[in-house]
Image (spheres, rainbow, N blue to C red):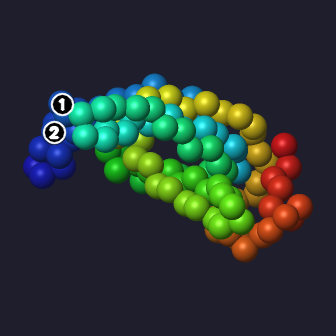
Amino acid sequence: MLQNIVKYIEDKYHHKNDFPLFNSGDTITVFFEIKEGEKKRIQSFKGVVIKKQGIGATKTFTIRKTSGGIGVERVFIFSQPNLKKIDINKKGKVRRSKIYYFRKLKGKKAKIKS
């Protein structure tokens, strides 16, 4: 009974986005809308997909990039209404679905094979 109610609410209010299929190891650029006061602008975040997890309305993906020698990770929810576009820059070949070991790598070792 409770599952039916949750499914009904997800179907009615769930914001569906048509994004391209990507996996862990891919380098992608995510464009999302930021509201600053009354102004809105589009900001991009380019990095490597570390993991994808969840199902339905709670499906998320984590992206990692290095900015000024410091690793920055950001978690995005697929159903966020402020996600505008996802571009796949490069497909990566990795053996795992969650590449947490990527956090420890630096320099040339942090490259992912295409």
Q: Answer left or right for 13 relative to 1.
A: right
Q: Is residue 9 above or below residue 87?
A: below
Q: Is residue 18 above or below residue 76?
A: above
**Residue type pointed to by label 1:** Lys
Which is nearer the eye, 28 or 15? 28
Which residue lies at the image location 55% right of the left edge and 32% below the top edge? 86
In the displayed orientation, state which residue is furthest to the right: 108
Q: Is residue 61 visible?
A: yes
Image location (x, y in percent) of residue 103: 68, 69
Label 2: state its secondary structure: helix
Which residue lies at the image location 25% right of the left edge and 40% below the top edge? 37
Q: Which of the 4 image quadrants contains residue 87?
A: top right
Label disc, if present, on residue 9 of the rendered structure:
2
**Residue type pointed to by label 2:** Ile
Q: Count of labels shown?
A: 2
Image location (x, y in percent) of residue 78: 42, 41
Which is nearer the eye, 8 or 110? 110
Quarter of the rendering occupied by the C terminus:
top right
Give the alpha-carbon distance from disc 2 to disc 1, as whole Å: 5 Å
Label disc, if present, on residue 21 of the rendered structure:
none
Which residue lies at the image location 89% right of the left edge and 61% below the top edge? 108
Label 1: state its secondary structure: helix
Which residue lies at the image location 31% right of the left edge and 41% below the top edge? 36
Q: Is residue 1 above or below residue 89?
A: below
Q: Answer left or right for 43 relative to 14.
A: right
Q: Which of the 4 image quadrants contains residue 84?
A: top left
Q: Is residue 60 above or below residue 12?
A: below
Q: Which residue is mark 1?
A: 12
Image location (x, y in percent) of residue 73: 55, 60
Q: Are marks 2 and 1 in contact (CB under 8 Å)?
A: yes
Image location (x, y in percent) of residue 69: 71, 65
Q: Is residue 79 visible?
A: no
